[in-house]
Amino acid sequence: MMKNLGWALLLALSFNLTACLENQGSVEFGSAGSGTNTNNDFSVVTEPSPTPTVEPSPSATPVPPSGEAAVFQINNGAKLTDSSKLELSFISVFSAAYLKLSVGSDCSGGTYEPFVDSKMYQSAQTNQNVTLSVRYKDYDNRESECLNASILIDEAGPDIVFAKYPTSTVEEGSDVEIVFTVSDVGSGIDKVTCTFAGVAKTCAAGTNTIKIPSMVSGTYTLAVSATDKLAHSSAKSITFEVSSKYRSLVQNVQVTPNKKVDLLIVIDNSGSMEYEQKNMAKRVQNLLSVIKGLDWQIAVTTTDPRDVTLGDGRLVQLTGKKGQYILTSAMADSEAQSLLGATLQRTETGSGDEQAVYVTYRAIERSLSASGGNVNFIRPDAQLAVLTISDEDESKNGTKNDPQSLLNFISKTYGGQKAFSFHSIITRPGDTACKSTNGYAYGYRYEQFSKLTGGVIGDVCAADYAAQVSGIADGVRKTLKTFTLTCAPVVDAMRSVSVLKDGQPYAGKFSVNGVNMVFEADLPQGQYQVYYSCVK
């Protein structure tokens, strides 16, 4: 009996010891959370830009029962860096054999590689917030939860953009207004300095409005420089002339009986246009009905200035019409309207550096080439109109971004024979209701260009574009009754605008809108001479 009891005790002890060893071998994963202005007084009004913030990366770090958490860090947890070369640190919660690194926060990319404690990583993304994620795996193919970390890479200096400034010679005694913005999406602005005519002036981060009254003759430069909190710097300047002298001009224009007009629509396809893009086809559905009876051509390009398929002034292929880029009045009305609406309804997300003036310049250059989708769009004997639809303003200040440079290019290219008008549906300057909702930024330069060419200015935030599109379409019709002059004529007690037709005074009534003379009635065929004066 005692012998049997001893065997039973021995078996019981053996069973308990085995169970204990098996428990110790288990692993569990948990989770845890040169001229001088004699009047140096001018005012500067600055609207501060929002201070950039760096969002902390969400925590998705496993917490094992022991309380030790897995770790994934970029640059030892820093939230900001001035280099795209990053140091990554890896700490697992178990004996990890492999790790998988992904771009983004959800560990959806990458492939497993042998585990290391740290490594250097060259980011392809720069000047933006970069998020990376990692997942660990042991020799038994058990995976940890997804860990992620973010860091803001700032390798560029601040952005300095002149939104409003003199685009041609300013008449002596005039007031000048200049608007420019200084911003930095990375570390933020540390310092901004400005000089006007060599004299230091107060300016700051955000939107600056400078008003200079009663300018005297001379050459003036406004220079702006800025430094961010990582010591990156940028500098931009604009120079303009103030003159009291005039030049007398005569411009010859041949009027033919045709009614040809080419209309280029520049549509903003950036991400901020999501609201306006909704029902775009319906918003412009009455355009063709107003220009009915004209020999018209219509094409579409985007505000994207990049050298990509849908950028740099290239025409957009008509939706559903492979290899076709141009709508014509020879098409059935219903077909043309359907194609126009579908083509304007953009689904891609283009560049946020909208440049409608620049892409218009490039679209004309491309139309003059021997190949490509733009060929034959701008006809030599047709007038030209542009309609821009955008919730932001021109973002750069190069030669081809300048309205007067574009007008000079058109005049030189077509010998002063092509009438031109620029219409815009924009966030109109001063419309605070639009800007605070869906109008991302005031369209200062587009408004200025429309006024310079007598164009219509519409509201991009409007729920229905019907009324303003009708006005724009009527403006396109008026292009056929328009002379575009090489500069805005001066009309005062000493100077006027006069017109001869075939050598005789022409009595037709007209109005002057910027550089455009618009006649009330259709112009009879013939040779016209326009006499006018402009500021030198």
Image (spheres, rainbow, N blue to C red):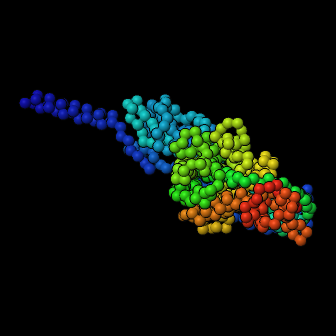
Residue at image coords 57%, 63%: 466
Q: Camera-side residue: 343 or 28?
A: 343
Left or right of 104? Residue 456 is right
Q: Camera-side residue: 24 or 218?
A: 218
Residue 110 against residue 526 in the figure, above or below = above
Counting from the top left corner in percent of width and height, residue 132 is at 53, 42
Counting from the top left corner in percent of width and height, residue 447 is at 70, 61
Counting from the top left corner in percent of width and height, residue 325 is at 60, 44
* Residue 285 appearing in the image: yes
Counting from the top left corner in percent of width and height, residue 482 is at 75, 59
Residue at image coords 60%, 38%: 124
Residue at image coords 59%, 65%: 467
Residue 275 against residue 212 in the figure, above or below = above
Left or right of 327? Residue 251 is right
* Residue 275 appearing in the image: no
Residue at image coords 52%, 53%: 334
Residue 276 against residue 413 in the figure, above or below = below
Q: In which quarter of the image is the N terminus?
A: top left
Single out the residue that lies furthest toward the bottom.
Answer: 493
Q: How many labels does the image show?
A: 0
Q: Which image quarter: residue 500?
A: bottom right
Q: Quadrant of the C terminus?
A: bottom right
